[in-house]
């Protein structure tokens, strides 16, 4: 699967989607090729692990692109969780799951999100406003704003992944070898 970069001088939609894809690619690279010990490693005073982070991002993908944007069920494994009793479920269980299972869960969520993105852009464009999300005044954000929020979510966690991965095996940088911009 080839992930895109933001274009140098593209449309607004291509720039936003390309920016999100770049952040997804960085996360995939930082979480790739590690065994269970690597996916459970922490650094400093933080309890964040790459396994928990990747499972959290799978939840974010399914929650935003299925539930919040289209009002669809986010599906399993998210349906049966008592979030009030275990609000950190994805972070906790991401350290217990096999690395290949966490990566597969995230990749499947990203594929569903890409399909939803294509659907929204083809039908309504960046001005699409979901019915299931609003601020306290009842204003629904545009799809443009939601993409920016997701880029921010990924970028913040890419920074966490940088620090954790460097502490595991010294891997540094923002682009996989041969896969730069």
Image: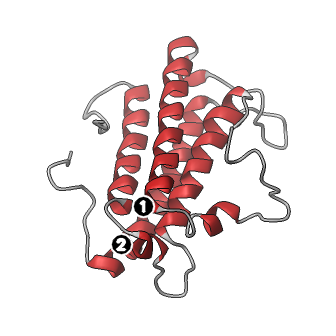
Element under disc 1: helix
Q: Is residue 113 above or below residue 158?
A: above
Q: Is residue 141 among what the camera can see?
A: no
Apparent side of residue 54 relative to residue 63 in the rendered image (left or right) = left
- Extreme residue toward the bottom, this view: 45
* Closer mark to the observer between disc 1 and disc 2: 2
Q: Residues within 10 Å of mark 2 (few under 14, many from 20)?
A: many
x%, y% of residue 144? 55, 32
Q: Quadrant of the N terminus?
A: top left
Q: Is residue 42 above or below residue 109?
A: below
The circle on residue 165 is: 2
Q: Is residue 153 among what the camera can see?
A: yes
x%, y% of residue 102? 50, 55
Point 20% across, 47% down: residue: 179
x%, y% of residue 107? 45, 43
Q: Is residue 107 above or below residue 115?
A: below
The circle on residue 136 is: none
Q: Residues within 10 Å of mark 1 (few under 14, many from 20)?
A: many
Element under disc 2: helix
**Foreground: 125 or 98?**
98
Q: Quadrant of residue 15?
A: top left
| Label 1, label 2: how far apart the Cα atoms are | 10 Å
Point 39% across, 50% down: residue: 23
Apparent side of residue 52 relative to residue 82 in the rendered image (left or right) = left
Q: Which residue corresponds to mark 1?
A: 158
């Amino acid at each position: 699967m080839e992930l895109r970069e933001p274009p140098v001088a593209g449309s607004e939609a291509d720039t936003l989607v390309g920016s999100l894809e770049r952040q997804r690619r960085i996360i995939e690279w930082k979480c790739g090729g590690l065994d269970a010990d690597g996916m459970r490693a922490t650094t400093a005073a933080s309890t964040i692990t790459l396994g928990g982070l990747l499972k959290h991002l799978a939840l974010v993908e399914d929650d935003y692109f299925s539930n919040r944007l289209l009002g669809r069920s986010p599906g399993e494994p998210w349906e049966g969780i008592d979030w009030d009793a275990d609000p950190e479920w994805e972070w906790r269980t991401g350290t217990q799951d096999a690395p290949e299972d966490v990566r597969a869960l995230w990749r499947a969520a990203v594929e569903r999100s890409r399909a939803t993105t294509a659907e929204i852009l083809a039908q309504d464009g960046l001005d699409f406003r979901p019915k299931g999300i609003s601020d306290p005044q009842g204003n629904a954000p545009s799809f443009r704003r939601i993409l920016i929020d997701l880029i921010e979510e990924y970028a913040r966690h890419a920074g966490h992944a940088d620090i954790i991965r460097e502490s595991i095996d010294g891997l540094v940088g923002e682009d996989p070898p041969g896969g730069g911009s």
